[in-house]
Structures are given as C-alpha cells and as structure tokens.
Image (spheres, grey):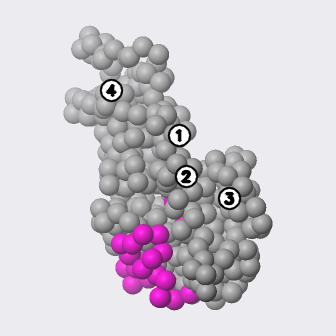
Amino acid sequence: MSAPQRPTPAATARLKTGGDCLRFANRLFKSAGIAHGQGFVNAEEESLTLLGHATGLAWEKLPSCFKRALTAKEKASFLSLVERRVFDRVPTGYLVGEAWLGGLRFRIDERVIIPRSYFVELIPEAIPQWLPPVAQVTDVADICTGSGCLAILLAKRFPKAHVHATDLSAEALEVAALNVADHKLAKRVTLHETDTMTALLKGPKFDLILSNPPYEPEGIYRRLPAEFKKEPKGSLVSGKDGLDVIRKLLAQARETLKPHGILVIEVGGLQKAMHLAWPKLPIMWLPTADGADCVCLIHASDLRRELPSPGARRGR
C-alpha cells in the first residue's frame, strides 16, 4: 500500500460540519490502512472518539454536531488528531488520553498498554462460577496490571476482596495509581513493583490470580503494525515463544493459590503452545463472544499435582 498523502488546505477547507469531518477521516483511515485492535474495532469508532475529544462532547451527544458547522477550534483540533493518527500512527487511546473498559473510564498514556481484554466479558459471571460465593472471596491478584484497569474491575466485582496488582514497570504503576485513586479504591487495591508475583510470595494466599501478561513471541512482535509498537514493548513481548512470563506465573501461582483457588490467564494465540509446554496440565478454555476462547483457567490442585515443586526442581 502506497503512503497516504497529507490532505491539502483546499481539501480540508470544504469540510464544514461534524459529519463532513467524520466522512473525511473515515476515508483517510481506510485508504491509509491504519490498524485497529487497540480498543477499537473499526475506523468509525476511532473517528467518533477523536471527534468527541475535539468537541468535548460525550459519545451520546455527538450526533448534535453531525449537521452543524464545527467551530474553527473544533475543526483544527480534530484534523490535527486525525493527522497524528494516520501519519505518526499514534493510537487513538493515546491521542485522547483515556480508555473505557467494562463501562469504566481509565486514564492512559504511552507508559501503559492500551486496555483491551477478554476479561471484561469474563469477570462478571464466568470467573465467579469457579469460586466460593463472592462475599467469601478475600484475596485477589492482578499480575502485569499495566493501567490497573483489571485490578479495578476485580475490586468492584469482589467487594470484600483486597486486590494486589503487580507490574515490573514503575512508570506503568504511576498510571495505575492515578486510576486507583480516580475510582476511590486505594484502601482495597495495593500496587507492587515486582517481576510477576515475586513480591507476593510471602504474602497472603489467593482465591483468584488473574493475568493478561505479555505473550507475543519476538517474531510476531516484529511483524505487528506500527501503532502497536507505540505501546511499551515489555507489555507485549515475552521471549522467543511468548511463554516466558507465563512460565514464571504458573510456578508462582502454584505456591500462592489457596487450595480452592484458580489461575486465569489471557494468552492470545498461544493455546496450542500452552498444551505443548504442559501436556499433562488440565487447562480449561473459557468461551468468549467472538470465539477466540483465549483465556485459560487452571485450578490450584492441578498446578500442584502436575508442576514440580521448587524443592523438587532443586533436587531436594
């Protein structure tokens, strides 16, 4: 695909209404071949989000500007955002500084991966089915928390639980702290700068350990569209086969889950790799609306039975 041409002043001068600007942006996005998947499924969702940011209008009020002329400031702001999206390949989430997940708003910037997760489907109903009654769930962990969005969703779903959220990136945890404060959960969500669960190994045992970790193999990462490479590489890539973080997580979860506890991990396209790496480990794949079924659930008892203990690995 040839590189898109920057719009000329004559082309943009013809744009008057919000609808004109949306149609212009959608055509440009599609001709430029921008990649979606960072919280948006198509060009129309991205252009509407950028128009909302430029006009200050909430999503549900955007139709009010479709037929009216934009102010000069609104139009200039929108066109600037569109150009950065197309020519600099900056993801829309970073351009507007926020993302929505599970009906909640989260602050984001280039320090964190843009929130998107099948867990938004699974936290409300599917995951609690494998746990004691919600009021009895007291200790939950969100590993590789990034912006803290999943930790916050967990805290709201399990109102009696304390949530421990970890990340290796101090910068990511700065963003997570803002979101935890925004949602008034500082007393129930504790952030830890640590590698996977290392800082939690001597703490409480967990009813639920949840993680949307880095899982892209190096080779896959090199072929990702440019906008995905605007995100922190450490939030996406996990070694040659994508399993480096998951290997640590399984071993640590073995030691930190309560007897009835479960480990739930989103693994992208690594379903086959998971079964090859741990052929005897019972792994259940939770169904998702689009059929990707890339979230696995593993019971504490199966981890303890099929994974060697740390002492066994040292020959004790």
Reply yes or no: does residue 301 show up in magenta: no
Which residue range is magenta in the image?
185-213
Give percent across and percent down for residue 166.
Answer: 43, 71
Instruction: Name the amino acid type tagged 4.
Output: Phe
Mark found first going from the N terminus, 3 or 1: 1
Drawn side of residue 123 relative to residue 27, left or right: right
Drawn side of residue 229 relative to residue 254, left or right: left
Give percent across and percent down for residue 156.
Answer: 52, 74
Which one is closest to the eye, mark 4 or mark 3?
3
Instruction: Name the amino acid type tagged 2.
Output: Gly
* Badge 2 element: loop
Mark found first going from the N terminus, 2 or 1: 1
Q: CA distance from mark 2 to mark 4?
A: 30 Å
Q: Residue at x 35, y 37 (%)?
A: 90
Which one is closest to the eye, mark 3 or mark 1?
3
Badge number at residue 242: 2
